[in-house]
Image (cartoon, rainbow, N blue to C red):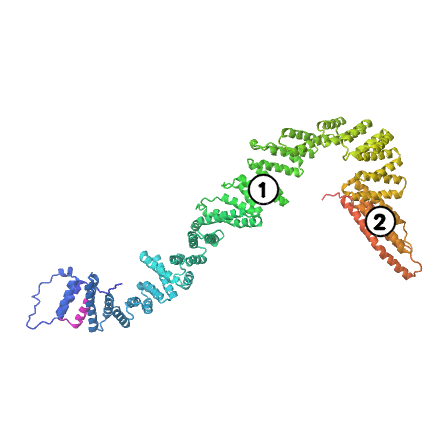
Amino acid sequence: MRLTVTEHYPLTTLALCCAVLLSGCSVAPDNIKRPRLADLPAFDRSMLLTPPEVNEQQLDLLYQQILTLQPAPQTRQKILYRLSQMHTRQLEQQELPPAQEREALQQLIARYQQLLADYPADPNNELIRYQLARSYDLLGQQQACLEQLDAFLQRYPQSDLAAEVWFRKADIHYALSQYQQALQAYLAVLGNNDVSLELHARYMAGWSYFKLQEFEQADEQFLRVLDHSYTELLLTEQQQPQQSLRDEVLQTLSISLSYQEQGHSLQALLARVPYPPGQRPLLMVAQLYQRLADFLAEKKLLAASLETYQLFISQYPDTLLAAQFQLKLIRHYLDDADATQALAAQQRYIELFGPGSLFWQRATVTELAETTPPLLQYLDYFARNRYASALTFSGQARQQAFADVVPLWQKMLAVLNEPLLQKQQAAGDYSAADIRYLLAESYAGAALQDDALALYTQLGFTATEPGTLFTAQDAAYKALLLSEKLAQQHASTAQRHWQLQTEFVNVHRSHPAAQQVALQQLQQRYSEQDYYGVIQHSNAVTDWPLPTQSQTALVQEAQFLHSQSELALQQYAAAEHSISALLSQGAADLSADRRKLLTEQLASSIYQQAQQPDAPLAAVQQHLQRLLSVLPDSAYHEAAAYQQVEMARSAGDYAAAISLLTAFLQRYPDTERTSTAKAQLLDSYEQAQQWDKAAAELARVAAESNDPEQQREALYLAAQYYQRSGDNARALDSWRSYANRYPQPHLLAQEARLQLVELYQLQQDLYRQNFWLDKIAVFEQRNAAQGNERSRYLAAQALLELGRHESGLFAQVKLSHPLKQSLQKKRQHMSAAIKHYEQSMQYGIATMLTEAQFHVGELYQQMAAALLASDRPKGLDELALEEYELLLQEQAYPFEEQAIAIYQQNSRLTQQQVWDQWVQQSFQRLATLLPARFDKTEAYSGVAEDAY
């Protein structure tokens, strides 16, 4: 930089001065006559009005002429100093060839040196020495220049030119690679507070530190330059020079930081150097990070470059610049085909700048509008990718995968629904309805069923925005399916499911499943036994409002439920009509099983009409005959035929009854009614008084038939007829023969044994009676799988009788001395009786269970009483007798307690609606044994007559 210090004087004044100098400094010889005033020409006043035009060459010539006149020393000194300045200015203004320029400079140097030598105390020497140093500098004589600069600073340390001199000195040292001296000189410039030089001096001080490898100090100087230049950019309009300097400094600072810890060093630098106005502008900070990252990337230090971005993002996560830097990271990873890092960076973008982040809470509309497109892009990618991945899993892994995708859909919806973005159209091509649908799907996959149901319901019934991935019908149907699942898990949600079904049928009738849903409601009514409701609403399915979409199978099912409800409500005539219509209209579409069922139900409806108590006898006969003729193979044929027999018998037409029974037994030789029919046939024979003939015939069949089964049946019937005819001896032989020869069928064998018991009872043959009672019990236990309610009843009754027998033997044993023997015998009978009673109770026949349980309790009570009433040993004194009494009480007490417990157990059967004489007697015994609890009279307080 060339600086010139000159003084400007008016030319008129300069001319006058020259005239004075010439007149005052010249010495005229004595022989020369001086002119007089009168000899002078007249004064031209125009000279005062128009100053003469004099250029520097003329002025230089004039000064030279004055010097030839040998002016006074002071005048000469001033002229010489003035000439030096003029020559300096002329040299600066001229464009001379290098050789001429060097020669001119050397002449100037010679003049400066001569002036300094001739006038060492002249006050203008400050400028002359400065110009001398400058001239050496221009000649490239840096050492000579340094000597003059040092001399200047030594003589004029407080000079106004000191800052510039320090700066020129620093530049020379720096050029000579004398960085320590250069640094000291630059710092001296800064110490002079010269605003014009401060920026460049600080910049070069930074470079000096850099050359000395004092990077942190260099960084501080560079940063201060940037701070100052950034402030200047804000305050002035001259941005181009400042921007050029900034670019250069940013580049230099990036180089310095690259030698250190890159981004971490920049972080430390920014924290270490305060920004004079206060908070350092974020744009400036971002520019520092950006330039460093660019430089590192240019030098192939990619990891450090990326880390620089990351450091800024970590320190300023809630700023738009951080979002922009994050996008740079993502673009780098994508350009580098590093999918893993790119995905991680995109995920980080979502975390830092998505809904719920600090950035999202503080961002302006403009900032949100800029960050939203990539945010939606990344959210959409991750959500759809994870959604597709979740579909490939199963079990718990699938559920967790869907749970992970839920927050992504939620964030997308938060972005799309952000009020600040509604006018910005930042959503682009994203459909909020589709996102809500995918969120509902994810809720369902994650087993968040309530959330899924709420969203499906909204999309299916209340949402107004259409979707591209689904229809409202689809969403509504999924809501319905999910609601059904929840209703199966939690009964409390059944009502909600019902309401949803109703709304689905009403709103989405065109859906292919709508008629099915209506049928499901009908089925639910049926399962809840709301038969009237089924009949009332079956037309909601059968008369579907969209005939072209009506499904025949669903209509038939509704008609079927309608008919079943009529059957359940015993509307048999209506049921017959409905079933007949269903069989005739949809016969081709009915399955074989359904057709079979309906056919049987048709028979049932006809049969049940014949069972109505108010039906006329003729109508009953008509129904039965219609059933037998129209549906000869129905399951009700047997019942109808049997009912005809009963009607004939009820009318006293035994001949007809015998005929009907004969036909019945031929068609149904082995059914549950067979034995009864045979009994009725016998009864009919009895009413017809044909016993002997029937018995003889049956005996002949039993003796002559080669069919063991026929023999068995004939023997059985013969025994019955003999017994009915009063021939007990033959009846006894027949029953005994049957019981011994035919233990199977078990049920008939049990009946035979029962007859033997009764016959021996008539003969008062207790031993044989008990023998066959025991056989009944043993064979029932042995053939339990073949037994039925009747056989179990017989077995329970037999065991009860055996228990009674043992109870009687128990009661007959009197406890006497020796007590041990009688007590043992009594215990044996007690144990045997209890065993029979308990076996009887195991069959669960209520009427016998209460009696058996009562007798067990009674046995314990009687044993306790027997012990207390037993004979006392003779010869005991009073004390011994008292001890014996106590001993008996101790023995008797457990029996009494056991009796109480069993009576109480019997009494608790009232909770199962069981009440008979044995339960009543149990309460009576408890009233005696525990009067405080059971011997109480109920208090009746009357009926309140006053209203509350």
Q: Quadrant of the N terminus?
A: bottom left
- For residue 481, which numbered disc appears in the image? 1
Mark 1 neighbour density, 10 Å: few (under 14) some (14–19) many (20 or more)? some
Coordinates of residue 68 in the picture (x, y in percent): 13, 69
Q: Are marks 2 and 1 in contact (CB under 8 Å)?
A: no
Q: Does any portion of residue 606 appear in the rendered image? A: yes
User: Would residue 923 be visible to someone looking at this image?
Assistant: no
* 18 is higher (above) or lower (below) than 715: below
Q: Earlier along the polypeptide chain: callout 2 or callout 1? A: 1
> In the displayed image of the protein, which residue is found farthest to the right?
875
- The Cα–Cα distance between marks 2 and 1, rounded to whole angstroms, is 63 Å
Residue 527 locus on image (x, y percent): 66, 39
Q: Position of residue 191 (x, y in %)?
A: 33, 68
Residue at screen point 69% across, 33% down: 567
Helix, strand or loop at label 2? It is helix
Q: Quadrant of residue 884?
A: bottom right
Q: Amino acid at mark 1?
A: Leu
Residue 72 lies in the magenta-colored region: yes
Q: Is residue 646 above or below residue 78?
A: above
Residue 193, image x, y percentages: 32, 66
Asked whether 390 or 520 is in front, the reply is: 390
Q: Is residue 431 left or right of residue 809?
A: left
For mark 2, what is the residue? 832
Q: Is residue 227 above or below residue 625?
A: below
- The amino acid beneath tag 2 is Ala
Of residues 176 and 935, which is closer to you in this image?
176
Q: Which mark is residue 327?
A: none
Residue numbers of the magenta segment:
70-83
Q: Is residue 764 left or right of residue 33?
A: right
Residue beneath the point at 82% across and 53% down:
897
